[in-house]
Image: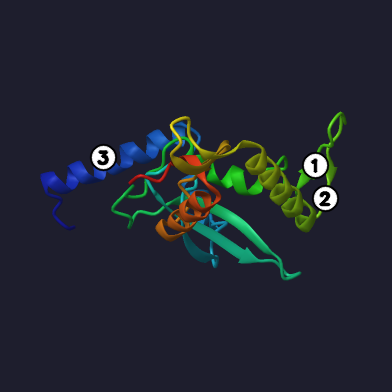
Amino acid sequence: MPQVTRRDFLKISAAGTGAAGLTALGFDLAQAAQLKQSFHIAGASEFHSVCPYCAVGCALVAYTKENPDGSIQLLQIEGNPDSPVNEGRLCPKGATAMQLATSARRVDNPLYRAPGSKKWQQISWDDMMSKLAQRVKEARDATFVAQDAAGNTVNRTEGIAFAGGAAFSSEEGYFAAKVMRGLGLVHLEQQARV
C-alpha cells in the first residue's frame, strides 16, 4: 500500500470536500465534464475599428460571419485589448456600439418630412443630397456678409454652422474644415481634439 503523506491527505480531502459541496449545490460534475460548448464567434472574421462616439478613439474589434445567402452578419463588438488607448475597455456609450449597428430602430435610408406634413417619407440618396445642397446654398446666399460694420472685407456666412465628429480621421476633419471655410463658415466645431 502506498504511503500517503500529510500534504497528499490534505489535497485529497480538499478536492473531495469541494466536489461534495458542488454536488450539494446542484452541480453534476459528470455532466459538466461531458458538456461541449460552442462559442457564437467561433470561425468568425475579425475586423478592427474605432468607436464613433467621442474624441478618445477607443479601438473596437468586430466579429462577423458570412451567412449561406452571402450576406454578412455582425456577431459581436468589443474593446480591442491590444489598443494602448483603451486596453480593451469601453465606456457605457462604447459598449452599446453593437446596438448602434443592429438596432431594429436604426434608420438606414434617408427620410424626408415636407413642410406641414405629419409623416416621414423615404427618398433616394440623390434626392437627399440635392435637397441638402439646395438648403446650404439658400442659407449661404441669405446670410452672406461681404463687409463688416467697419467696412472690412470678411466674406463670411453666419447662417450655417458645422460640427465634425470623432469618427472623422485627421484627413477627413482637415478636408471638411477646408470645405466649410471655403463656403465662408465661421462657426466650426470639431469634436476630434485628441
Earlier sequence position, callout 3 versus callout 1: 3
Q: Residue at x 17, y 48 (%)?
A: 8
Q: Are marks 2 and 3 in contact (CB under 8 Å)?
A: no
Q: Are marks 2 and 1 in contact (CB under 8 Å)?
A: yes
Q: Quadrant of residue 124?
A: bottom right
Earlier sequence position, callout 2 versus callout 3: 3
Q: Report the amino acid beneath label 3.
A: Ala
Q: Report the amino acid beneath label 2.
A: Ile
Which disc, if any, is residue 14? 3
Which disc, if any, is residue 123? 2
| Foreground disc of the pair 2, 3 | 2
Are there few (<14), some (14-19), or many (20+) residues within 10 Å of tag 3? few
Are there few (<14), some (14-19), or many (20+) residues within 10 Å of tag 2? few
Left or right: where does residue 73 sit relative to residue 186? right
Q: Quarter of the image for the N terminus: give it.
A: bottom left
Left or right: where does residue 83 sit relative to residue 107? left
Mark 3 and mark 1: Cα distance apart in space: 69 Å
Element assignment for label 3: helix
Name the one closer to the observer, 21 or 2: 21
Q: Residue at x 38, y 33 (%)?
A: 21
Earlier sequence position, callout 2 versus callout 1: 1
Q: Report the amino acid beneath label 1.
A: Tyr
- Give the mark count: 3
Measuring from the top left, give residue 29's x and y in whole percent: 46, 46
Which disc, if any, is residue 112? 1
